[in-house]
Image: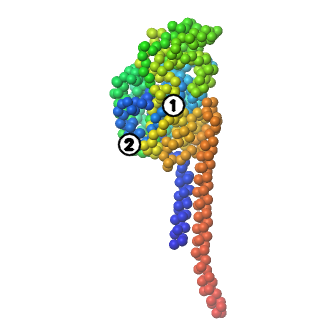
Amino acid sequence: MTSKLLWVSFILAALTLSVTFSLQPDEQKVLLVSFDGFRWDYLYRFPTPHFHYLMKYGVHVEQVTNIFITKTYPNHYTLVTGLFAENHGIVANDMFDPILNKSFSLDNMNIYDSEFWEEATPIWITNQRAGHASGAAMWPGADVKIHESFPTHYMPYNESVSFEDRVAKIIEWFTSKEPINLGLLYWEDPDDMGHHLGPDSPLMGPVISDIDNKLGYLIQMLKKAELWNVVNLIITSDHGMTQCSEERVIELDQYLDKDHYILIDKSPVAAILPKDGKFDEVYEALARAHPNLTVYKKEEIPERWHYRYNSRIQPIIAVADEGWYILQNKSDDFLLGNHGYDNALAEMHPIFLAYGPAFRKNFTKEAMNSTDLYPLLCHLLNITAMPHNGSFWNVQDLLSSATPRAIPSTQSTTLLRGSDKPREYEQEESYAYFIGVSLGSVIVVVFFIVFVKHLIRSQIPALPDMHAEISQPLLQA
Ligand SMILES: [Zn+2]
């Protein structure tokens, strides 16, 4: 009876130890999806049953503070690096680097120039360096050679490739003989239509309904491939959208001499490079130009934007108030919806939903920063994070209780410009992990010793009898 009890105790102790070790999330798979320009409140303004299905069975963050400037390329690079724009170097969709003496613009192929991207290392490269495979379907920057690498699998950017074809590739990569553990999927809407119609337009209803159907299609395909309860699905976006009006336009030609500066980026954050000797003149003229335009010398850009320490940020930036539009003059293109404004504005904020084995069910969180996604991804993929501006601590409550808290390997050690003070809790969490392991080990060893002792003792009573039997004849002899 006692022996049985000891066996049970031994098994329980061994289980404790194995659970402690299995806390390492080395089995997690992640699919990160971005619907470009999906503003956080579209979920409430229009019927979105598939998004709400994810909210019910997964997690939802109501306000995600993205990074300044709230444009597509800077924010997509933040999602995969955890860095502010000044640190990852993709400071705008249109840039000029005075050191490289090169321009970057979405309108031409020079976005494929590796040098623009190599101030950071995107997560797919770090994932591959750790021995895993990544796959990217049209994710901005994922078809650029960065640090001599591409994603293991990727689709060269082509906006005419359908959502269904992109999903098919992702499924193929997740189910191949050497499956990916990280998938990245990008879709251009509702950004395109948001610019065209303006987010306040009732015609946005069908646009959002179409996105909801696309999410439904993705869920259906994941279920069909038996990936639905295997892959952690994260649905997010890069920025929101605000309504513009031709009544709210600031024409630079009305205030500045065109020959005195080069306009690198336009609206709503005009990036201005004054020509030699013209800095003061340009700055003074702009500073007085318009009540809805705030003008900053580079060194005066507000700290909270983390948008100063990079040579691609121009000597002067002029930021329009929400809903205002900066044009060189009226011959420029005008869009009814735009983004790029102050990242503190709610209308600039994207969505964030997640569903999967690592995430809690039916859990709503008030706020996070988009920089926090990167350490969360590294944690799920069990890879060592590069230095970043995010905080795993901010988002670990999104994870289900069965999922481990931080393990030491996912934490970055270098303190980056713009980061908060070093995070002591990370140390605490690593202690907790090691205490768990040590305790488990001690329990197993103690029970093993007790068990062996018991085994030996249970054999001992037989010995005197044997001696007796042997000794008897001797005595008789
Ligand atoms: Zn975008």
> On screen, 255 above or below 453?
above
Circle 1: element type = strand
Amino acid type at circle 2 is Lys
Amino acid type at circle 1 is Thr
- Relative placement, left or right, of 226 versus 392 is left
State the image coordinates of residue 187 (x, y, percent, origin top left). Answer: 42, 29
State the image coordinates of residue 359 (x, y, percent, origin top left). Answer: 47, 43
> On screen, 104 above or below 447?
above
Q: Which residue is mark 1?
A: 65
Does the image show residue 111? no
| Residue 9 falls in image quadrant | bottom right
Residue appearing at x 47%, y 17% in the figure: 324
Q: Quadrant of the C terminus?
A: bottom right
State the image coordinates of residue 430 (x, y, percent, origin top left). Answer: 61, 47
Residue appearing at x 34%, y 27% in the figure: 206
Q: Is mark 1 within 8 Å of ligand 1?
A: no
Q: Nearer the viewer, residue 431 or 79?
A: 431
State the image coordinates of residue 280 (x, y, percent, origin top left). Answer: 62, 10
Q: Nearer the viewer, residue 182 or 310?
A: 310
Q: Which residue is mark 2?
A: 223
Q: Is mark 2 within 8 Å of ligand 1?
A: no
